[in-house]
Amino acid sequence: METPVAIIDLFAGAGGLSLASRSTGADVRLHVELDPLACETIRLNEDYHGGEVLEADVQELHGRSLRERASAEAEPLIFVGGPPCQPFSKAAFWSEDGDDAAYRRARSLGEVGADKPKTHGHRDDERRFLIDDFLRLTIQADAEGFVMENVASLLAPRNKPMLDALAHRARRAGYRTTVVRANATQYGVPQKRERVFLLGAKGKTPPTPPLPTHSDDDERLKPVATAGDVLAPYAGTEWFEEGEEVSGRWAEHLRTVPPGWNYKAHTAWAGHPQPTFVTETRFWNFLLKLSPHLPSWTIPASPGPWTGPFHWDTRRLRTPELAALQGFPPGYEFAGSRRERVRQIGNAAPPPLAAPMISSVIAAVQGTPIEREALACSA
């Protein structure tokens, strides 16, 4: 019988990666999160989570002390986490020259007190260093493995050098690494949400990319889940939420957008007799409405007043609906106002998507990787 794997969840947020970890049979010992509301969300769902909730800034912590706090001295330890993704769109933050690079290298070596860069040529955003802190803490704790989740744009040409550098530093520290790009619909989540995972394990082989379980064109797999599948239980008036009604300038336009369409329904391109808009002149999610027969588009953390996806009944999605589209279990509670609940849900990692990634690292750590065809590149 294998020794149970201990989990420390960094940037724990609303608990998506913790839920995924628990579903694999791992023991979540510690949740680290700076946002008080997110910490309260995890505490509200103690039936789903084990371990302590530590409200703290990861930049002020040391990996060894986290391992001790998690009482994970006698068993394998895996760090999981999704560092904030907002700063990663600035490729120059990750260049190999200048003060930024020197600061990142110092932090990766554990020099927490290193001088912060004086110049970097972009809007100041401390979060751009948090991805390095994830790896720093993992290495300091001498963890047996890690799962880092983030946006798919990390594989874009302007950002990939940053991801490659992070994987290179992990390999220098003794980890075998694998990069996986996956769509949440491939693992039973009713949402077209693409994510990148950097998997690492101290073992003989790198973690194996998990095979998809769902498909819309492969009859050997389960069919993809649709928005209609998971939103049906929340259609009744007893689920009404203040703020779900739509009113104002574009309310009538939204009402007449067919399910599965956006503002383009009101263009000459779509054959509208009195077009209001010209196609390709608005963001794609402007007046975007779900179809009950398809998966949802990506759920945003901070939607604008006319940013979708909206429900096909011409209203904003209720927070239990948003949670269901992310793969959270029924009855999971989120702390705070509607706006804060939406933010937490939109920032979360879908648990059914993250679970097979965590399972892959556990298998590699325990020396029993599953032989499967590669879904993504290994490094």
Image (tube, helix red, strand yellow):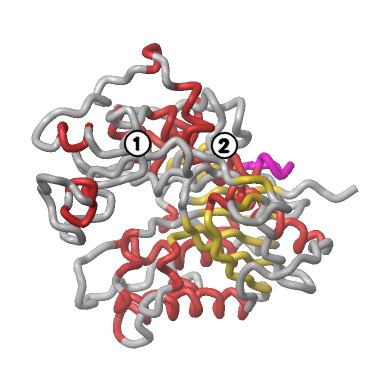
Tag 2 secondary structure:
strand
Q: Where is mark 1, residue-wise?
A: 342
Residue 28 lies in the magenta-colored region: yes
Dot 2: few (<14), some (14–19), or many (≥20) neighbours within 10 Å?
some
Q: Earlier in the sequence, mark 1 or mark 2?
A: 2
Can residue 269 be seen here? The reply is: yes
Say which of 284 and 238 sits in front.
284
Q: Could you give the CA–CA distance between mark 1 and mark 2, rounded to whole angstroms?
A: 24 Å
Residue at which label 2 appears: 52
In the image, 120: left or right of 188? left
| Magenta stretch, residue numbers | 22-29
Tell me: residue 348, above or below residue 77.
Answer: above
Q: Residue 171 location in percent, x, y?
A: 62, 78
Q: Residues within 10 Å of mark 1 (few under 14, many from 20)?
A: many
Residue 122 appears left or right of 368: left
What kind of residue is marked 1?
Val
Rendered residue at 55%/60% (across/down)? 182
Residue at point 76%, 69% (across, down): 203
